[in-house]
Image (cartoon, rainbow, N blue to C red):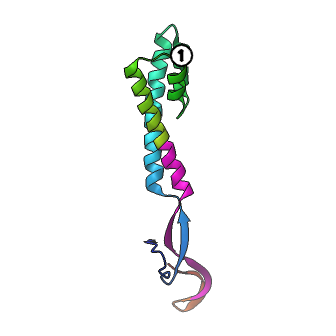
């Protein structure tokens, strides 16, 4: 169980402070980077296969910098250049979110779980059992 961390507030009894990567940024960054790179790679595969100068589009297989490589080495028209810029910026945004998720972790209070092996009485007999607090 997790509780939100408030700066300067003492921790609740039975909880300890934990740092963890920001899940929202990990999910958002992964989806943004992964989906835009996948679409770019599929488009790059079609362009490499269909054009006699297909090598001009091989840079699209490289994540994040690929669209900028093609923009610099190829000769795209204005529409294609704008698509390459938007794609490169989208992939850069996804990578930035992933990096930020780990560089600035969130602070949460996590319930401390304690489990002990202890003698226990069950009915008329005594045995060993697990006792825990969470």
Residue 43 sits above or below residue 128 on the image:
above
Question: Which of the 4 image quadrants contains residue 116?
Answer: bottom right
Q: Residue furthest bottom?
A: 124
Residue drawn at x 54%, y 73% is: 17
Rendering coords of residue 103 (x, y %) = 56, 56
Q: Is residue 51 above or below residue 6?
A: above
- Give the farthest residue toward the top: 52
Task: Give the position of the N terminus as an image quadrant.
Answer: bottom left
Density class for disc 1 (Cα within 10 Å; few <14, some 14-19, many ≥20) is some
Can you give x and y, in whole percent of width and height, for residue 108 in the image? 49, 70
| Residue 108 painted magenta | yes
Q: Quadrant of residue 36?
A: top left
Q: Position of residue 82 (x, y in %)?
A: 40, 26
Read off the magenta span: 94-120
Q: Which residue is found at the position 51% from the left and 17% from the top?
A: 74
Label 1: which secondary element: helix
* Residue 48 visible in rendering: yes
Answer whether residue 43 is magenta in the image: no
Residue at the image point whose x is 50% and y is 46% from the top: 96
Point out residue 120 in the picture as x, y percentages from the top left corner.
57, 88
Report the number of numbered marks: 1
**Looking at the image, residue 94 lies above or below residue 22:** above
Residue at 46% in and 46% down: 29
Residue 34, visible in the rendered structure: no
Which residue is the site of mark 1?
56
Extreme left residue here?
Answer: 79
């Amino acid at each position: 169980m997790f509780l939100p961390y408030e700066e300067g507030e003492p921790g609740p009894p039975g909880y300890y402070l934990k740092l963890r990567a920001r899940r929202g940024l990990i999910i958002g960054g992964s989806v943004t980077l992964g989906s835009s790179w996948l679409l770019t790679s599929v488009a790059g595969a079609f362009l490499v296969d269909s054009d006699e100068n297909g090598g001009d589009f091989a840079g699209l297989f490289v994540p994040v910098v690929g669209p900028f490589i093609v923009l610099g080495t190829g000769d795209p028209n204005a529409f294609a250049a704008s698509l390459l810029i938007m794609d490169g910026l989208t992939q850069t945004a996804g990578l930035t979110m992933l990096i930020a998720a780990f560089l600035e972790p969130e602070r949460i209070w996590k319930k401390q779980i304690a489990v002990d092996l202890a003698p226990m009485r069950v009915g008329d007999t005594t045995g060993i059992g697990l006792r825990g607090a969470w």
